[in-house]
Image (tube, rainbow, N blue to C red):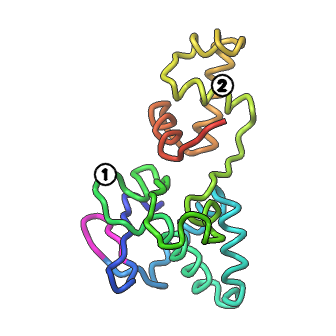
Amino acid sequence: MCKKVEFFRFPSGEGMYRQDGEVKSFTQNDLALINYSFQYIGMHYSDAMNRLNCMFASSHKNISYFRFRVVDRFARCNFSSLDTSKFDIDEDGHFNIEFVSCPLRGGECPDEGVICQPKLTLNIRRSEMMVFAQLKNGLSYDEIAVVLHISPITVKHHCEALRRTLGIPTNEKLIAFWHNNNMHI
């Protein structure tokens, strides 16, 4: 898993990333980062992946180059600002999408809301999402149970399922995931 990665671009347009204090050019040879990011995009941003697949279809024959182009474009649209507030790929391996300045914002870019600022695609049941929405408000299992008219044990099971599905170890990190991804019901 790739953790604590910060993508950025030089004014020349060259893609870079920082990991473990080391700054590197982002190239087709960064296989671990590319393969991890490619899989994460496909799992969590299916509309973006579909658009990127079409965009780079001519590169499909060279799979490593194709994956590099997909990840590079996704990073350019969502992570190209160097900041220190939070990593683009955090310590748990989750993406933190940023607002990236682009001259085509405001309706000119057909990729806005698809590749750029993509919608999260999650395989979460509606009942789990209802619990998630209450959990992010800081409610306890008992309080969520009262609000949703279910048992605290059911709330606990839904939280466990959410953590398993998202690969997140704690409820605190579930709440951070909700906010980092601007989720809503």
Q: Is residue 31 magenta?
A: no
Q: Residue at x 59, y 84 (%)?
A: 64
Q: Given the image, on which type of amino acid does mark 2 rest? A: His
Note whether 52 is above or below 158 in the view shown.
below
Per the rendering, the mark at residue 157 is: 2
- Give neighbour class at mark 1: few <14, some 14-19, many 20+ (Cα, 10 Å): few
Left or right, residue 125 beside residue 64:
right
Q: Residue at x 59, y 69 (%)?
A: 38
Which is more toward the observer, 129 or 118?
Answer: 118
| CB under 8 Å between discs 2 and 1 | no
Residue 79, horizontal then vertical, whole percent: 44, 65
Residue 114, horizontal then vertical, whole percent: 65, 63
Sequence-wise first label, 2 or 1: 1
Q: Between tags 2 and 1, which lies in front?
A: 1
- Whole-number angstrom distance, CA of label 2 to CA of label 1: 33 Å
Q: Is residue 19 magenta?
A: yes
Instruction: Tell me the element at label 2.
Output: helix
Task: Tell me where residue 146 sits by quadrant.
Answer: top right
Q: Which residues are magenta?
A: 16-23
Note whether 13 is above or below 130 in the view shown.
below
Task: Tell me where residue 35 sits by quadrant.
Answer: bottom right
Q: Given the image, on which type of amino acid does mark 1 rest? A: Ser
Left or right, residue 14 beside residue 115:
left
- Give neighbour class at mark 2: few <14, some 14-19, many 20+ (Cα, 10 Å): few
Instruction: Tell me the element at label 1.
Output: loop
Residue 33 visible from this viewpoint: no
Residue ID for mark 1? 85
Q: What is the chief secondary structure element of the magenta stretch? A: strand
Q: Quadrant of the C terminus?
A: top right
Q: Residue at x 70, y 76 (%)?
A: 53
Q: Residue at x 49, y 85 (%)?
A: 28
Per the rendering, the mark at residue 15 is: none
